[in-house]
Structures are given as C-alpha cells and as structure tokens.
Image (cartoon, rainbow, N blue to C red):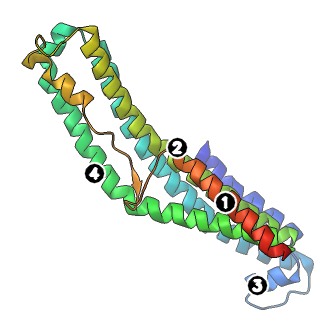
Amino acid sequence: MALLIVRILPVFLAAFQAYVSNEKESKFWSLGYKHEEQKYRMIVTFIGEYIHYNVFFEFLCITALSYCLLISQYVAYLSQFNARLRNMNFNVLTQKGFEVLSSYNSLEVNIHLLKQTLSTALFLILLSCSLNTYGALAFYLTQNITPFLIVEYAMDAFMGSVVIYSLIIYSSKIPEAIQQIKETAGFLIENYQLSILSRGKAAFFLDRLEKKNVIFLSAGGMVDLKKSLLLSIIGAFFSYGLLILNLGSN
C-alpha cells in the first residue's frame, strides 16, 4: 500500500503543479524556451515536475521504507526471542540456558552490525530531511509565494517530517525490544526465586541477559535514535519558526 501511494502521488502532484503553473515555471523546465500555447506549457511543466517528484520523493521514500522494513525484521527476531524466553519453564531453562544465551549473543552481534551499517546513511537522510523541512518553513514564513511553490514547499516539509518520524519510531523499537528481554530475564529470576545462593550455574545466563546493555541505532554515531529525539526536533523547528518570524517582522 505504501509503495502504491509513493508511485501514484508524484502523478497527482505533477498534474496539480501543471494546472497552477505559469509561463515562468514552464520556461524553467523547457530550459528557457517559451511556449505560446497553454497546453504545451502544462505538458512541459507536468513532465518536469513528475521527474522531480519521482527522483526526489520516490527515492527518499523507498529508501526510508526499506530501512524501516529491515529494522522491523530485527525487532521481530528480538520479539520472538523474548516470547520463547518467557514461555520456557524452569527445567528447560536449566538445560538450555547457555544455548539461549548464545542465541541472544548472535542477535546482539547482528544488531551491532546493523547499527554500524546504517549509521552514516541514517545521518545523511535525517540531515537532508531536516534541511528540506527547515528551508520550506523559512520560505513559507518569510516570502509571498505562489500556489505553485506552496505545494512544493509543503511536500518538502511533509515528506521530510514523515521520513524523520518513521525512521526514529522504527529505530526506537530495537532498544525497546531489548529492554523487554531484560525485563523478562528479571521476571524469571524473581519468579523462580533464584537467589544468589541457590541459582548456581544453571541460571547464570539470566543474570547475563538482565545485565546486557541496551543498543540504540544512531545517526553518524552522534545522535541516538529514540523517541525523545522527536521532541527535541519539534522544539528546534518551533524555535526556528519563532526566530524567523521575529527577524521577518524587523
């Protein structure tokens, strides 16, 4: 469904842009050539805008969607591990404890690899979307723009916001799933009353699971992608908007 929307949306946007365009926009896409008839101007504008939306928005959306699906796959693995761990009885835990711990260690290695692989790409995507959103906000608040440009700036801000929100929400699910595994390990320790004196080596792995560090995906190793980051971004854009309005009024 998401891919279908991404495919169809550029067509409707390009059609609307062609409908509200004027001679200036058509000359831009025709490299300065002036078309006398309105229908030719609309056709040229439609083709140019469709290519623009197709290359810019479709590539960005498909890339972000691919990352979200990839991250979701890792979240599913963690959730399955947590469900198996929670449903194990004490006898199975004592027999397969180190096997379970080994399985989690393999998941942890893969998540670290995912973090390292996506770090730079996530930073570039989030930076690009933030700059596009900020630029659209600045132009909208400071200049009198035509309906043709309003649609373009609105889509810049909308798509940038959707991509930022989606990547942060999906990325935050990995540390949440790891935290659930840690809580399950703690629950099992309390449930079976495994005190320091009585648990022995059989349940040693539960302690190891409970003490595992939570792994956050990051953007360039500079910012951890967690839900609280959304509030920081919203606050930053709100502050920039007020600053732009104050500068514009002066």
Q: Would you name the residue on which mark 2 appears? A: 227
- Contact, mark 4 vs mark 1 (Cβ under 8 Å): no
The residue tagged with tag 1: helix, strand or loop?
helix
Q: Quadrant of the C terminus?
A: bottom right
Residue 103 horizontal side relative to residue 176, left or right:
left
The mark lying in front, picked from 1 and 3, is: 1
Kindly identify the residue that appears in the image at 16 percent across and 32 percent down: 102
Disc 3 crowd rating (10 Å Cα; few below 14, some 14-19, many 20+) is: some
Q: Quadrant of the N terminus?
A: top right
Q: Earlier in the sequence, mark 3 or mark 4?
A: 3
Residue type pointed to by label 2: Lys
Quarter of the rendering containing residue 148: bottom right
The mark lying in front, picked from 4 and 1, is: 1
Q: Which mark is residue 28?
A: 3
Q: Which mark is residue 217?
A: none
Residue type pointed to by label 4: Leu
Residue 191 x, y percent position in the rendering: 28, 9
Q: Which mark is residue 237?
A: 1
The residue tagged with tag 4: helix, strand or loop?
helix
Observer-nearest of 199 and 128: 199
Residue 216 horizontal side relative to residue 45, left or right:
left
Q: Would you name the residue on which mark 4 appears? A: 113
- C-alpha gap between disc 2 and disc 1: 16 Å
Residue 26 x, y percent position in the rendering: 81, 81
The mark lying in front, picked from 2 and 4, is: 2
Q: Earlier in the sequence, mark 2 or mark 4?
A: 4
